[in-house]
Structures are given as structure tokens and as C-alpha cells.
Amino acid sequence: MMAQNTLLVVAGPTGIGKTALAIKLAKHYKTEIISADSRQFFKEMRIGTAVPSSEELAAVPHHFIQHISIHDPYSVGDFERDALKKLEELFQLNDIVVLAGGSGLYIDAVLQGFDSFPEIDPSVRTRLKQELHQNGLAELQKELLESDPVYAKRADLQNPQRVIRALEVCRGTGNPYSSYLGRKKAQRPFRSVILGLEAPREEVYRRIDNRVDAMMEAGLLEEARGLIEHKHLNALQTVGYKELFGYLEGDYDLDHAIEEIKKNSRRYAKRQGTWFRGKKEVLPLPHDLPIKEILDLINRQLKLKHDG
């Protein structure tokens, strides 16, 4: 790869318009899109993860959308390896490639590598999963708050997979999970320009509510019904599905489930915003900025990086 290869990253909260902008950029630069939306990796999950439409997917080539099954183990480390390999291929033909998605952890993995952790005895994770099943998430959350308050403050404590992963390291090493984060990052053979789409909170929330309503009209309940037997899988421990599983099991009515999806989606969007606002290299962009102005901004950034 040559030094002038550039990865254009389109980030931002859910429902903000990342897909639409990524497609415009890919068309302009005659290139392809790598998806860093970890919820869209799975073949069986389409409506609840807002997979791009068939028209959008046909507009420019996309990679890492519905490429694995919910039954396949797939870690952020696996994605880092696969995405870097795909980038190497794409940079043979294109000076610019677009990466789009709302999963900050997965974007970080591509841009700077994934933090390195000691190997942990698999029995530690097995035990944690048993405790989750027997005692619920609250007990594990409490332990994480005590074992690693630094990580607990920034983590998504509603995500059982993240809580278990952090406790696995805490228990397996005797050290806080956070002590292994932020170490020396990998050098990449490409430069990056990160665009962070943003909008006033009320607009983000309005878009989320409209998106959830559209998902329900598109058949999200039926999609969840067809997946409920697999609800224990990590892929399905996510907003849009777990709330409907509760409805289907009689825990509450459908209106409550829909409100919970909207509420949890807003929380997710807030965490996404926290991720990219915490990165000084992100260029914040109004979500409705005309494409010409975005292209001008990108070109200025590329010139600065070239001159620098």
C-alpha cells in the first residue's frame, strides 16, 4: 500500500444518515464501502439492524453486511483482521475507501488496532455466563463497578457481552480491564479522515422514533418471532430484539416493548455521540450539510495531510 491511500470514515449516532452519505462519497470517489456496523454483520437480522436497502446495496459495492450467521462466533479482532485484508485489496484499485458505521469499537479496531489482552482460561467465561443466567445482569454490573470503576463509567453496562468480557479479564488476571486499554496503537499503512455526523438531540431522537416505527411496519415483530429460539446468542443481545422477546414471552404489552426500543435506541445514540466527541481527530459535520461542502472539507483535509 502507498502512503497516500485514504480511509474516509463516516461515523455518528444511529439514524443520522451515515449510509446515505457513505454512498454519495463512494459514488463521487468511484470506490467501495466497508461497513463497521457490528449489528449488520448477521444474515438473519435485517429489519432490526437497519441493513441498507437492496437499492442502496446495489448503488455501490458494500462489504461486511450480512456476511456471517448469528451462530458464527465473530469478535472485534476477527473484524479487524478481515477488514484490513479487504482494505489491502481495495487500495490496490482505489486511493480512497469509505468505512461507515456506528460501532466505535469496530472503527477503532480498523484505525488503530485492538487492545491486547492476556489469554484467559475459558472456564472463567463459562462461569460468568452461568452467573448471568442464574443471578441476572445486575449482580455482574455491581461486580464490575467494584472491580473496575474506570471502565464501568464508560462501558455499556446494559450489554451483557461487554460486562462479561470485562469481568473475564478482571477475574482472570487480577487486574482491571481498563489497565489493558489504550496501550501503544498499531500503525496503519493509510491515512484517515473521520467525519462525525451530528444533529440537535431532538432531531436525533425524532429520527430514532420514526425509524423504530418504520421497522415495526416493515415486520420487525415477525423477524423477532422467527429468532426467539436463538435469543441466548450474543448477536441477539441487542436493541430491537431483546425488547420484543420480552413481549413475545408475555412480560409486557407491545406498546411498552416499542417504547423500550425507542428509549434504548436513544441511549445507544448517546453513547455513540460520546465516542466520537471524545476523539479530537473527528471532524464534526451537521447531518444536513450539502455534499459539495463536505467534499470541499475532505479535499482540504487531504491537502493538509499531504502537506503535513
Image (cartoon, rainbow, N blue to C red):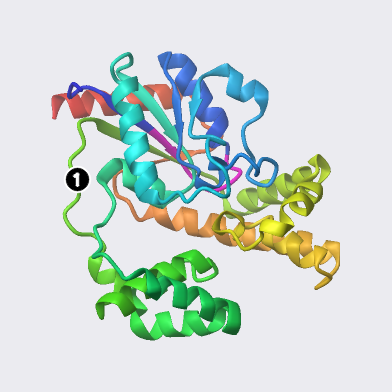
Residue 54 visible to the viewer: yes
Residue 163: x, y in percent? Answer: 45, 71
Residue stretch in magenta: 9-16
User: Please, which residue is most extreme toward the left here?
Assistant: 308
Q: Which amino acid does the dot numbered 1 rest on? A: Ala
Q: Is residue 69 left or right of residue 304?
A: right
Residue 282 visible to the viewer: no
Q: Is residue 30 left or right of residue 178?
A: right
Residue 135: x, y in percent? Answer: 58, 84
Q: Any magenta on residue 15? A: yes
User: In front: 44, or 163?
Assistant: 44
User: In front: 22, or 227?
Assistant: 227
How many discs appear?
Answer: 1
Q: Quadrant of residue 232?
A: bottom right
SS class of the residue under badge 1? loop
Q: Main secondary structure of the magenta part?
A: loop
The relative height of residue 165 versus residue 93 in the rendered view (above or below) is below
The relative height of residue 159 versus residue 186 in the rendered view (above or below) is below
Residue 140: x, y in percent? Answer: 48, 80
Count neighbours of disc 1 (C-alpha within 10 A) and say few if under 14, some if 14 to 19, many if 20 or more.
Answer: few
Q: Is residue 103 left or right of residue 308?
A: right
Residue at the location (49% across, 59% down)? Answer: 271
To which residue does mark 1 refer?
186
